[in-house]
Image: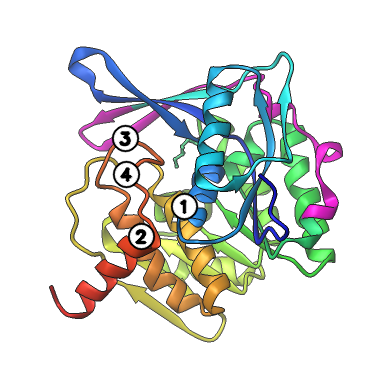
């Protein structure tokens, strides 16, 4: 499908997902993941016009990702199908301290994507371009594609949003820190998680962490704090959002859902704190089922829960 206007354009690697929902039986639930694809779907479920930029393999996983996007209304017309390189895959295991990811993605179609493949006109016409540390970790050419996309966006006055999403299975910390912080310095909206940010900055105190990212030039920092909720900061104001109570089953993709919900609400309201309140609830609701996409709530679910919270229910 093609939209006349794409408000949010996400860039990175979509993946096929095998989720060990019942590890003892060796059964996996198949789905789709990839952080920026999850963000795209989450934003589309909140009513935003969304597109994706990247590449898929000519295989079952790639076709399932494309089918997902089409069901969800995410524009896939600028996603190439590579004739021979595969779609990346990942596996989700559930251990005592939460989910653990492992990957089969080296040499994937998305990792072969580079700056020359970017639809520069589309990027210049969006309202926000979003990418992540994972988008850059998968290969040098994909890393450069994010920098070029951000340069193009900034030159056109398009907002840039970046989730640090640190994956040390994909690159070493020193290189990750250098690249991620270079990208954050080009981002208007930085969306780190506390664990990532602690490793990247060496700091553990949320206010000190947001100071680092504001210092790099972000106009909004939205820091997710896991079970402690989230903190949103601008250079002139900051606000902490307390966690809501949910029966969490699987937090896979909760940070991506936060990003999509945050960006959708930020574009709708122009208010980072309204976006923070909204995304804080959306991300918590997304942990109530297995997988990165299936449990992502829609606007009506988020608004109903926000109203219930406001009434103290
Ligand atoms: O870890 C990754 O590389 C992924 O993109 C897979 C997941 O969907 C994602 O991490 C969930 O946040």
Q: CA distance from mark 4 to mark 3?
A: 7 Å
Query: Does residue 105 show up magenta in the picture?
Result: yes
Which image quarter: residue 253?
A: top left
Q: Position of residue 177 (x, y in %)?
A: 60, 47
The correct choice, above or below, for 108 with respect to 152 in the image is above
In 3D space, how far apart are the residues under numbered discs 3 and 2 (Cα atoms)? 19 Å
Quick one: SS at disc 2? Answer: helix
Mark 4 and 3 residues: CB-CB less than 8 Å, in contact? yes
- Segment colored magenta: 93-122
The quadrant holding residue 308 is bottom left
Q: Which residue position holds label 2?
A: 282
Q: In the shown orientation, is residue 265 left or right of residue 1? A: left
- The earlier-in-sequence mark between 3 and 2 is 3
Residues at circles 1 and 2 in contact by the CB criterion of under 8 Å: yes
- Name the one closer to the observer, 24 or 43: 43
Note whether 130 is above or below 32 in the view shown.
below
Instruction: Select label 3 or label 2 by which is in front.
Output: 2
Spatial distance from mark 4 to mark 1, Cα to Cα? 14 Å
- Any magenta on residue 49? no
Badge 1 local density, few (<14 within 10 Å), some, or many (20+)?
A: many
Write the residue at 51% across / 50% down.
39
């Amino acid at each position: 499908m093609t939209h006349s206007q794409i408000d949010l354009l996400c860039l990175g690697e979509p993946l096929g997902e095998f989720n060990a929902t019942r590890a003892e039986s060796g059964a996996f639930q198949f789905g789709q993941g990839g952080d920026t694809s999850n963000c795209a779907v989450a934003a589309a479920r909140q009513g935003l016009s969304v597109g994706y930029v990247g590449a898929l393999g000519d295989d079952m996983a790639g076709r399932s990702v494309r089918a997902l996007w089409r069901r969800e209304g995410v524009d896939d017309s600028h996603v190439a199908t590579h004739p021979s390189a595969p779609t990346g895959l990942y596996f989700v295991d559930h251990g005592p301290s939460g989910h653990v990811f492992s990957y089969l993605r080296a040499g994937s179609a998305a990792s072969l994507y580079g700056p020359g493949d970017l639809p520069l006109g589309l990027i210049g016409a969006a309202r926000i371009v979003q990418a992540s540390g994972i988008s850059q970790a998968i290969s040098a050419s994909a890393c450069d594609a994010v920098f070029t996309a951000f340069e193009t966006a900034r030159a056109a006055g398009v907002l840039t949003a970046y989730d640090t999403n640190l994956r040390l299975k994909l690159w070493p910390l020193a290189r990750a820190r250098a690249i991620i912080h270079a990208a954050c310095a080009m981002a208007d909206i930085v969306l780190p998680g506390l664990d990532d940010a602690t490793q990247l900055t060496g700091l553990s105190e949320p206010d000190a962490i947001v100071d680092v990212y504001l210092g790099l030039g972000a106009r909004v920092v939205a820091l997710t704090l896991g079970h402690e909720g989230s903190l949103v900061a601008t250079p002139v104001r900051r606000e902490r959002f307390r966690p809501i109570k949910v029966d969490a089953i699987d937090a896979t993709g909760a940070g991506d859902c936060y990003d999509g919900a945050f960006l959708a609400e930020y574009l709708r309201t122009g208010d980072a704190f309204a976006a923070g309140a909204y995304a804080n609830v959306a991300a918590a609701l997304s942990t109530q089922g297995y997988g990165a996409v299936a449990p992502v709530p829609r606007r009506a679910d988020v608004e109903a829960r926000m109203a219930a919270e406001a009434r103290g229910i």
